[in-house]
Amino acid sequence: MQKELRQRARRDLEEEIRVFRSKDVRRSRWGWVRGVRQAVGMPVAEMARRMQVSTSEIFRLEVAEQEDAITLKKLRAAARALECELVYAVVPMKGTLEDLAREAERERQRQAEERPKRGPKADPYRLLQSVKALLTLTGWHQGRRKRRRKASKAA
């Protein structure tokens, strides 16, 4: 059931990101905010008024976008001020989401094969039982008890 839900979700997402995959969508060197603002002919002062911030804040926002340091919240507010909608997506660099899922499954299987098989180290209870058995076989465990008993009788 979970597997089917994941497959359906991947198909739905793949359909939604197809638009981004079909075009070479790259932001300009100046960023989307400055590019759109200049393309629609909106002065910095007008955008600042719409966002209810100072003009210097608009310049900081545009620089932050260029440096990949802008938050989605600020970017969304800038888009609204430009009478635009913010649209973003996470798109696989190569292949499809299904390809990424298959690769992740192969990696999980590879790591599972490399992991040591379950044994005393993997199970603390089994480890404790093994240690007790070894102590009993060597006689150390019993000898230790006798010493404790003698010490308590002397007291």
Image: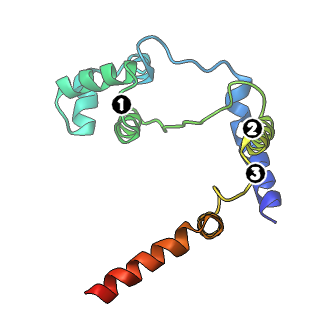
Cα separation between marks 3 and 1: 47 Å
What amino acid type is highlighted by mark number 1?
Ile
On screen, residue 119 above or below 109? below
Sequence-earlier tag: 1 or 2: 1
- Left/right of residue 66 with respect to residue 116 in the rendered view: left
In-front residue for pair 36/9: 9
List x then y, in percent, for residue 87.
54, 37
Q: Which mark is residue 70?
A: 1
Which dot, 3 or 1, sits closer to the camera? 3
Label 3–label 1 contact, CB within 8 A: no
Q: Which mark is residue 107?
A: 2
List x then y, in percent, for residue 13.
71, 45
Sequence-earlier tag: 3 or 1: 1
How packed mark 3 is, by other alpha carbons closer than 10 Å (few <14, some 14-19, many 20 or more), is few
Disc 3 marks which residue?
A: 117
Q: Which residue is found at the position 54% from the left and 66% from the top? A: 140
Q: Secondary structure at mark 3?
A: loop
Cα separation between marks 1 and 2: 34 Å
What amino acid type is highlighted by mark number 3?
Lys
